[in-house]
Structures are given as structure tokens and as C-alpha cells.
Image (cartoon, grey):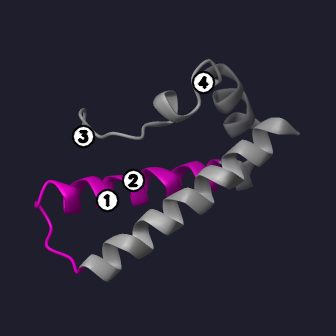
């Protein structure tokens, strides 16, 4: 989805090269990125009413996205 907010480029401006480099060398980090993209897409689909989910489910997805974002930031800072 081209209009999905919270893309990694928006969330980590100026760090896309570091993200790509770490993704290429760290399988665990690559899985975190995949999980982030999946959850982010699910949130976008819920927000745009493509998929109907409960408010509680959407809140849980948002919390999951935040935890994944924290994991990405931690990996980038090491």
C-alpha cells in the first residue's frame, strides 16, 4: 500500500541505509522489519475500513507496532 502511514522511512528519517545494511546481515532484525510491515499494513487496513476489526484488536496492533518500533530503534543504536 503506497499510502500507508508509519513507514520505516517516516519513522526513522535518515536511517534507511543503516536499516537496509542491518537487514542484510541480521536475520533477526529482518524478521522484526517484516513483522513491523505486516502489523503496520493491518493497522492501515483497519483505519481505512478495508478490514473490520474490533477497537480492542486495533489497540493491540498499535501496541505491537510500537514495541516493534522500539526493537528497531534499539538495534539501530547498537
Q: CA distance from mark 3 to mark 4?
A: 19 Å
Residue for badge 2: 40
Report helix, strand or loop for mark 1: helix
Residue for badge 1: 43
Q: CA distance from mark 4 to mark 2?
A: 17 Å
Q: CA distance from mark 1 to mark 2?
A: 5 Å
Region in magenta: 30-54
Residues at marks 1 and 2 touching, judged by CB atoms closer than 8 Å: yes
Q: Compare marks 3 and 2 and give the one earlier in the sequence.
A: 3
Residue 17 in which image quadrant: top right
Residue for badge 3: 1
State the quadrant of the C terminus. top right
Q: Give the foreground label among 3 and 2.
A: 2
Report helix, strand or loop for mark 4: helix
Q: Residue at x 31, y 59 (%)?
A: 43
Report helix, strand or loop for mark 3: loop
Query: Is 57 drawn above or below residue 63 in the view shown?
Result: below
Amino acid at each position: 500500500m503506497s499510502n500507508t502511514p508509519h513507514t520505516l522511512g517516516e519513522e526513522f528519517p535518515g536511517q534507511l541505509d543503516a536499516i537496509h545494511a542491518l537487514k542484510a546481515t541480521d536475520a533477526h532484525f529482518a524478521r522484526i522489519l517484516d513483522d513491523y510491515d505486516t502489523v503496520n499494513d493491518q493497522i492501515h487496513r483497519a483505519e481505512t475500513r478495508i478490514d473490520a476489526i474490533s477497537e480492542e484488536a486495533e489497540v493491540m496492533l498499535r501496541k505491537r507496532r510500537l514495541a516493534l518500533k522500539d526493537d528497531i530503534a534499539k538495534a539501530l543504536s547498537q
